């Protein structure tokens, strides 16, 4: 029971996981919080909690049944599709209300309403507002509500959420409301739009425009390319190399002033942005029945996101007269997001494309009432953001909006996480600002019966761009790199662009049919792991973005080696949880080649031998991964820090693959030499010095009993408030960065799913959490141990005829008022 230990051991404070990593906020009124009738004591669910119910709900069109299995997974059966979304909203709220509302408050920049006066919290709220999160959600909501089907779905979902809120008693409030001393408000369709935009920020909000602009000022063009190469030599793209691009590309015109005003311009920008985790990504693949033992396709997906409690996902089945779908859902949005139905299965990995650019704006004067564009002064639009601060007066933030680009996110009053004043103005052009209706892709996939339905559904995905994998019982497999992507000339948007000239604007979008894709390829599988979608020498558009290499190499290598007619679900489980380190396979030989063992003492040689004898697996008890990571991280610092520290301006650190590939090609790689010393260092000098510098840290880890990889990595699944009593800490799990099992300290596979498209669907899945968001419930974190062990639960696509199956533990009967 977590409730009592929480009160005894935890400081009654809270942190905002999205913006901060430390605890904030005042204690709640203790009398109210400790009340036996209404306080935290009421949140301790009995172990035999009864979820049976017979309810009359205002908003249902007809009767509905919810069969809840032994894992608290609801199987929803309705007589019309609209009721499915009403019931889904009701169940999401019943089990995850605080999480839903907290996430949408964060998306809207409303956390100061909850936590009160705090400069860092206010900074976070301002950043959300100035990025245009609410603006983007409002624009998309207009499109959603103009579509009758989408409006009906969202209205039903919202009504379901509010049906739960309206019957919620004070004693039943989730403990986080009591801890933070506030109450839920009614759900709206805008909140659903905000949640989806928050996912867009996480998955399509990353860029390095300011950092690259600073680097361009410091380094020559040649050195810049050495630090930030467009593509790696070991690239294994989503669409295999050699695949021809035969369509006529959109004609793009490079601005006449690009050389002088863009590439050659030397700017310094002291803005520090809050960025999404660069490893927000995923693995997915589908294997043709020609390779499987059953003769039917197998689809696999594991999205890599932050590991939090309550979990991002909620597992459920929606059975309607038009479709029967099962999988992972988002508390806060209707539909099954990643899953399968009676005919097909579907999943996603992040596309990683650069769809967020900055433009420098020239205002007439400090009032910012007029801005210069195409040699004329134009009137500025404004959006006044009122940020409510708990217990304090409102904070008013006036944000200039440039119609051609978007909000002026950074100006003299706001420079992100930096406290210095900027003399420049930067407007943000972000694809997520454009009106869109992403919920249609998920509804379309839930209803899909074949490849054509899938291909039509994914056309509704605009932002964030995703690699959408598909498998069908008729044998089809496919993958589309789908999204609405700007057609860019080479390096457009890599640096801050001039905002006074329309020639730097996005000229068009890439036609949807020219997005990279495969349908039933000759190699009999499709896969993606966030790597570059195509060979950039064979694709006419600049992609931008940042793309990891090594998971894709691992997956393609393993799938290619599997013989036709042999692949099983167990093979896919082993692959999805595999800990083999391809990056170390490529890099360790270089470290061993350039180490000067004659300069090592006995202790240093001991750790070198451990690395040499390592099996290249990031398994729980291996010490090799820890030694390798500490050595290589130190090597990167010794290689790049002397040059990057020439300025205090924000710069982007080179990707891990950059140094490894540079050493493989050229041991005299320019950045090996330390510019702060009189001598010229060699690869042998720097590799040896890096190991010597790393050994004290390695030795300390060994003394602390944390040299074994799982102990060193220390994976944890933390509650959103960072309260230890509500979290699961020190999990015994391998994996890591560059590994198929991409589990880091607080980030990794957030939902593992494997679906075999046999006549009777055979599906397996697990996520690091539990169905109930209440820390006082045994269903709060019940999946975590199985997830950490690399094990799976069978996913039951229940039939209506199975209502008396022993797996059904509770029944909720819902009827209209």
Image (cartoon, grey):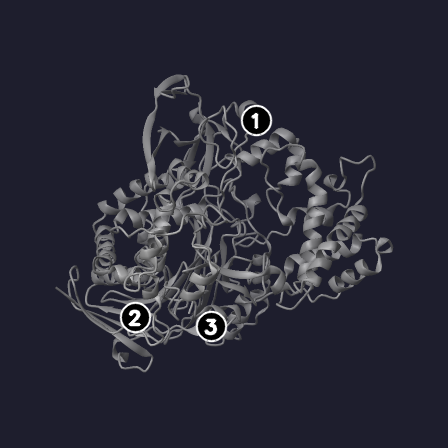
Whole-angstrom CA distance, mark 1 to mark 2, is: 57 Å
Give SS at disc 2.
strand
- Which sits earlier in the primary sequence, circle 1 or circle 3? 1
- Mark 3 surroundings: few (<14), some (14-19) or many (≥20) residues within 10 A: some
Q: Position of residue 284 (x, y in %)?
A: 48, 60
Estimate the x, y position of residue 662 in percent, counting from the top left: 70, 46
Which of marks 3 and 2 precedes in the sequence?
2
Q: Earlier in the sequence, mark 1 or mark 2?
A: 2
Q: Is residue 51 above or below residue 310?
A: below
Above or below 768: residue 690: above
Say which residue appears at 28% left-offset and 76% top-offset. 810
**SS category of the residue bearing label 1:** loop
- The quadrant where residue 602 appears: bottom right
Residue 792: assigned label: 3
Disc ID at residue 75: 2
Quadrant in the picture for residue 765 = bottom left
Residue 80 placement (x, y as % from top left): 19, 64
Q: Which residue is mark 1?
A: 267
Report the quarter where the C terminus lies: bottom left
Number of marks present in the image shown? 3
């Amino acid at each position: 029971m977590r409730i009592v230990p929480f009160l005894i051991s935890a400081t009654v404070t809270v942190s905002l996981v999205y913006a901060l990593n430390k605890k904030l906020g005042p204690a709640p009124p203790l009398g109210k919080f400790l009340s036996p009738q209404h306080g935290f004591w009421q949140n301790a669910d009995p172990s035999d909690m009864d979820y049976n119910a017979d309810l009359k709900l205002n908003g249902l069109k007809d009767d509905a049944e919810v069969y809840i299995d032994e894992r608290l997974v609801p199987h929803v059966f309705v007589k019309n599709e609209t009721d499915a979304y009403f019931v889904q909203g009701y169940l999401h709220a019943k089990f995850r209300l605080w999480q839903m509302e907290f996430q949408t408050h964060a998306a809207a920049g409303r956390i100061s309403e909850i936590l009160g006066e705090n400069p860092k919290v206010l900074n976070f709220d301002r950043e959300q507002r100035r990025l245009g999160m609410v603006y983007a959600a409002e624009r998309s909501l207009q499109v959603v509500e103009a579509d009758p089907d989408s409006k009906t779905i969202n209205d039903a979902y919202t009504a379901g959420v509010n049906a739960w809120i309206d019957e919620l008693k004070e004693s039943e409030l989730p403990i986080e409301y009591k801890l933070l001393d506030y109450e839920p408000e009614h759900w709206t369709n805008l909140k659903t739009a905000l949640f989806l935009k928050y996912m867009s920020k996480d998955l399509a909000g990353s860029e390095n425009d300011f950092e690259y602009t600073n680097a361009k000022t410091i380094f020559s063009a040649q050195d810049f390319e050495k630090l930030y190469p467009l593509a790696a030599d070991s690239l294994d793209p989503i669409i295999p190399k050699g695949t021809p691009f035969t369509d006529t590309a959109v004609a793009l015109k490079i601005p006449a002033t690009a050389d002088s005003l863009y590439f050659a311009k030397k700017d310094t920008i002291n803005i520090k942005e809050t960025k999404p985790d660069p490893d927000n990504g995923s693995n997915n693949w589908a294997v043709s029945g020609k390779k499987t033992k059953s003769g039917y396709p197998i689809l696999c997906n594991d999205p890599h996101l932050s590991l939090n409690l309550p979990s991002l996902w909620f597992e459920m089945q929606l059975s309607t007269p038009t479709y029967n779908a099962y999988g992972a859902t988002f508390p806060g949005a209707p539909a099954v997001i990643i899953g399968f139905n009676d005919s097909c299965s579907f999943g996603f990995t992040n596309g990683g494309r650069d769809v967020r650019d900055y433009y420098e704006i020239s205002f007439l004067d400090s009032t910012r009432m007029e801005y210069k564009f195409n040699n004329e002064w134009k009137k500025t639009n404004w959006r006044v953001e009122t940020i409510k601060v708990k217990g304090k007066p409102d904070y008013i933030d006036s944000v200039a909006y440039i119609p051609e680009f978007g909000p002026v996110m950074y100006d003299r009053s706001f420079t992100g996480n930096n406290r210095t004043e900027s003399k420049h103005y930067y407007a943000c052009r972000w694809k997520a600002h454009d009106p869109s209706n992403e919920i249609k892709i998920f509804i379309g996939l839930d209803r899909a019966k074949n490849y054509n339905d899938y291909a039509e559904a994914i056309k509704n995905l605009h932002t964030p761009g995703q690699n959408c994998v598909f498998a069908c019982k008729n044998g089809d497999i496919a993958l589309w790199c789908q999204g609405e992507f700007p057609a860019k000339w080479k390096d457009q948007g890599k640096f801050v662009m001039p905002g006074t000239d329309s020639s730097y604007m996005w000229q068009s979008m890439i036609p949807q049919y020219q997005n990279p894709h495969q349908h039933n390829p000759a190699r009999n599988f499709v896969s993606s792991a966030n790597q570059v979608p195509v060979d950039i020498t064979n694709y006419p558009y600049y992609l931008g973005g940042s793309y990891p290499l090594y998971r894709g190499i691992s997956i393609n290598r393993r799938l290619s080696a599997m013989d036709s007619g042999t692949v099983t679900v167990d093979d896919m489980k082993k692959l999805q949880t595999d800990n083999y380190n391809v990056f170390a396979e490529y890099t360790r030989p270089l470290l061993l080649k350039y180490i000067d063992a004659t300069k090592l003492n006995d202790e240093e040689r001991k750790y070198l031998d451990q690395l040499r004898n390592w099996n290249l697996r990031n398994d729980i008890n291996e010490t090799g991964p820890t030694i390798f990571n500490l050595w290589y991280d130190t090597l990167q610092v010794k290689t790049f820090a002397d040059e990057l520290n020439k300025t205090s301006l924000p710069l982007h650190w080179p990707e891990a693959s950059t140094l490894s590939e540079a050493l493989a090609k050229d041991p005299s790689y320019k950045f090996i030499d330390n510019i702060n010393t009189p001598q010229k260092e060699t690869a042998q000098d720097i590799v040896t010095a890096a190991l010597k510098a790393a050994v004290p840290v390695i030795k300390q880890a060994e003394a602390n009993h944390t040299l074994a990889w799982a102990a060193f990595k220390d994976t944890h699944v933390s509650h959103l408030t960072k309260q230890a009593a509500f979290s699961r800490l020190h999990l015994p799990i391998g994996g890591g960065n560059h590994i198929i099992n991409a589990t880091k300290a607080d980030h990794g596979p957030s939902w593992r799913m494997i679906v075999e498209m046999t006549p009777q669907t055979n599906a397996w899945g697990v996520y690091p959490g539990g169905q109930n968001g209440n820390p006082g419930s045994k269903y709060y974190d019940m999946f975590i141990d199985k997830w950490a062990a690399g094990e799976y639960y069978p996913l039951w696509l229940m039939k209506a005829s199975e209502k008396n199956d022993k797996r059904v533990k509770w029944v909720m009967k819902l009827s209209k008022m």
